[in-house]
């Protein structure tokens, strides 16, 4: 099971990073807080003080096609917000 799927790089997540030293990640829905913490510490080599998780529901999507009105949902996902200890940072753009 790959625990970390990808970082969430939105304006809201960037504001959390600047103000509170928190980073957001999409994670596997079966992963718990301890697994998320160890995966991030191993991958980025940082110390973590707290992990908060939430399950984000998918949005309802509707479209009108030749066959008629089609409705569905985008998939739900689990989001983890990780608080790093003071002086620690994660650089997502170093490998580009």
Image (cartoon, rainbow, N blue to C red):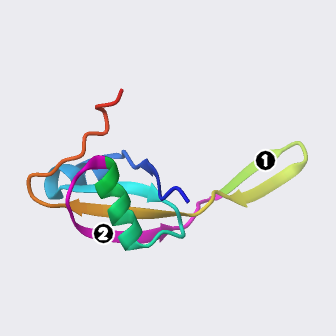
Q: Is 48 left or right of 73, judged from the image as shown?
A: left
Going 34% across and 49% down the picture, which residue do you hit? 43
Magenta residues?
44-60
User: Which residue is labeled 1 in the image?
Assistant: 64
Q: Residues within 10 Å of mark 2 (few under 14, many from 20)?
A: some
Residue 62, image quadrant? bottom right
Q: Position of residue 3 (x, y in %)?
A: 48, 59
Residue 83, image quadrant? bottom left
Q: Position of residue 70 (x, y in %)?
A: 80, 54
Q: Residue furthest right?
A: 67
Mark 1: which secondary structure? strand
Going 31% across and 39% down the picture, which residue do you hit? 92
Q: CA gap, disc 1 to disc 2?
A: 41 Å
Mark 2: which secondary structure? strand
Residue 67 within the magenta-colored segment of the rendering: no
Q: Residue furthest front?
A: 42
The mark lying in front, picked from 1 and 2, is 2
Going 82% across and 54% down the picture, which residue do you hit? 69
Q: Position of residue 85 (x, y in %)?
A: 14, 61
Q: Is 39 left or right of 90, judged from the image as shown?
A: right
Residue 47 within the magenta-colored segment of the rendering: yes
Q: Position of residue 45 (x, y in %)?
A: 25, 50
Q: Could you tell me which quadrant the C terminus lies in?
A: top left
Q: Is 25 left or right of 44, judged from the image as shown?
A: right
Q: Is 38 left or right of 90, judged from the image as shown?
A: right
- Looking at the image, do the residues carrying marks 1 and 2 touch, with CB atoms under 8 Å apart? no
User: Which residue is labeled 2 in the image?
Assistant: 51
């Amino acid at each position: 099971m790959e625990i970390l799927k990808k970082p969430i790089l939105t304006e809201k997540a960037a504001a959390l990073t600047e103000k509170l030293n928190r980073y957001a990640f999409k994670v596997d829905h079966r992963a718990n807080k301890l697994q998320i913490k160890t995966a991030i510490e191993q991958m980025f080599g940082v110390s973590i003080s707290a992990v908060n998780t939430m399950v984000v529901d998918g949005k309802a999507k509707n479209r009108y096609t030749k066959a008629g009105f089609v409705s569905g949902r985008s998939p739900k996902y689990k989001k983890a917000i990780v608080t790093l200890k003071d002086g620690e940072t994660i650089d997502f753009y170093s490998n580009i």
